[in-house]
Amino acid sequence: MATMITMPKLGLTMTEGTVLEWKKNEGDPLKKGEVVLVVATEKLTYEVEAPDDGLLLRIAVKAGETVPVGAILGAIGEKGEEPDLGAAGVEEVPPAEKEAASEREQERPTGALKGTEPVPAKGDTGKRVVVIGGGPGGYVAAIRAAQLGGNVTLVEKESLGGTCVNVGCIPTKALLHSAEVNRTVEDAAEAGLKVGSLEIQWDVVQERKNQVVKQLSQGVKALLTANGVEVVTGKASFIDDRNILVRSMEGDRKIESDAVIVATGSEASLPPIPGVDLDGVVTSTGALSFHEIPSRMVIIGGGVIGVEFASIYADFGCNVTIIEMLPQILPGADGEAVSALSKVLEARGITIHTGAKVGSIEAAGSSLVISADLSGREEKIEADKVLVAVGRKPFTEGLNLEAAGIRTERDRISVDKSMRTSVPHIFAVGDCCSPIMLAHVAMMEGEVAAGNIFGLDEKMDYSTTPGCVYTSPELAWAGLTEEEAKKRGHKVRKGVFPMIGNAKSLISGETRGMVKIVADEKYGEILGVHIVGARATDLISEASLAIRLEATLDEVVETIHGHPTFCEATREAALACLGRAIHSIPRA
């Protein structure tokens, strides 16, 4: 009797799928487990394997056709056998799932999770692509464009890797690692280890940081070279929408293009505070390379950059004060998670003022005096250094965007979800255009932009973007906060699991923090995950994937997590949402 190949159900809300390609023809022999065809949903591409040995007797659904889940796609059997193509029925989708699916309809990046590489549109290979900027968005876009057959030139005015590799994410985390090692050695006695006197060799800390930066920047260059990307050093500007002028020490050069990707990043914002230009007042770039660890530091701005530097320098023994204008540090993060982190930071000696405003900065001998309104009272705070970390702004200066007809809004390049600007063959990615100024967002935008140059019709979906704060302990989140979910009309259920109940956290001496899951009451769909604790920035990827696949609490709970691991806490938080956490005492 013939065996039917049917459209598989690949997700909770999947109701239909499309046949992309048959790997076999009618009459071809098959082995069980061999790939027969490729199907696709709006989320992913999936290779369907032969359920049995035999011949491919019949292809019932041609490539390009869309059919419901459970529909017969083909039949496998013995030579001469006549398959009954009515043997399997279309799966009936419950009304609740149909409703859920309709509610969730949104644009998603069609290039994600593909098992087979899409073929660029005919005639697109060999396109001349110019990428302006060699940061995370730019170099990733250049490599992707080269993979798709482009003739790619990347123009970078300074060092490959951009702000992230040279004066941002990477050097900050290198300092953070040294700070964490310092704190670990200080706490060694708790683990039964007796160590001698501890000395911070700041010059060695700086040397290690610089070496990490150098190695990663050279790694970016090697990747570009290996993919055949030409790297040109110089400042780029538009002559018109097709031609780029590059100015360098070697002279001027004109580069013609069929498509352009602008990835010029961002720069630190400086508020109009009197004294912000004094010696000792620095941005994040300056805070990476102090000649010595300051004894006292005031940080203006309690966003991600400010809080990370506060954590780093506090671990090195600096007396740190954060002054944040808004009601909480880390605006936009879940309030309960931020509250938990704030308590830990304050317990480590970091002073946090919220709802506060800096009026001026003055020099007083070798010190700086910061005048601030702290909850209605005027106070003066002395410091050795002042870090201004009130945010970043798009960098588009000198690009001559007007000559190419590129539209901007408040100095940010306007783009659609395909990363296309107002000029159809010009794209922009990263901080110069994106409202979410994160390196990992820029990288994905770079891949999307490159794909669209070569006709792949890809779009950005920011709904699963993880937020990562590299403090000690770390804070990370994905999806909606509890407050956002309620504002959007969800009836919310939440589950919180404290890290002190997690075995790996106890073993590691990292019991500070929690995992909080925000879920929809009706369907149990996970809407947001918020983690405070050790390795939170690593653990959050599971949450991003769960939200991307519209996973439910039950699906996380039914997934076995290793023991002992930090990630067990995520499963326990899902159990807490369902009122059945195993490793925490029930709340009265």
Image (cartoon, rainbow, N blue to C red):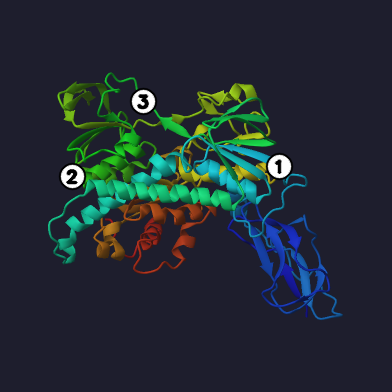
Q: Residue at x 36, y 69 (%)?
A: 563
Looking at the rendered structure, the secondary structure element under dot 2 is loop
Task: Read off the residue under disc 2.
Answer: 317
Q: In the rendered structure, which amino acid carries the disc numbered 3? A: Leu
283 over 52 or under it: above or below: above
Q: Return the residue at label 3.
A: 270
Residue named by callout 1? 127
> In this view of the protein, which residue sits in the foreground, 382 or 482?
382
Q: Amino acid at mark 1?
A: Lys
> Which quarter of the image is occupied by the C terminus?
bottom left
Q: Nearer the viewer, mark 3 or mark 1?
A: 1
Q: Position of residue 365 (x, y in %)?
A: 14, 24
Q: Earlier in the sequence, mark 2 or mark 3?
A: 3
x and y percent of residue 127 in the render?
71, 42
| Eye-nearest disc, 1 or 2 | 1
Secondary structure of the residue carrying tag 3 is loop
**Which quarter of the figure has residue 67?**
bottom right
Q: Amino acid at mark 2?
A: Gly
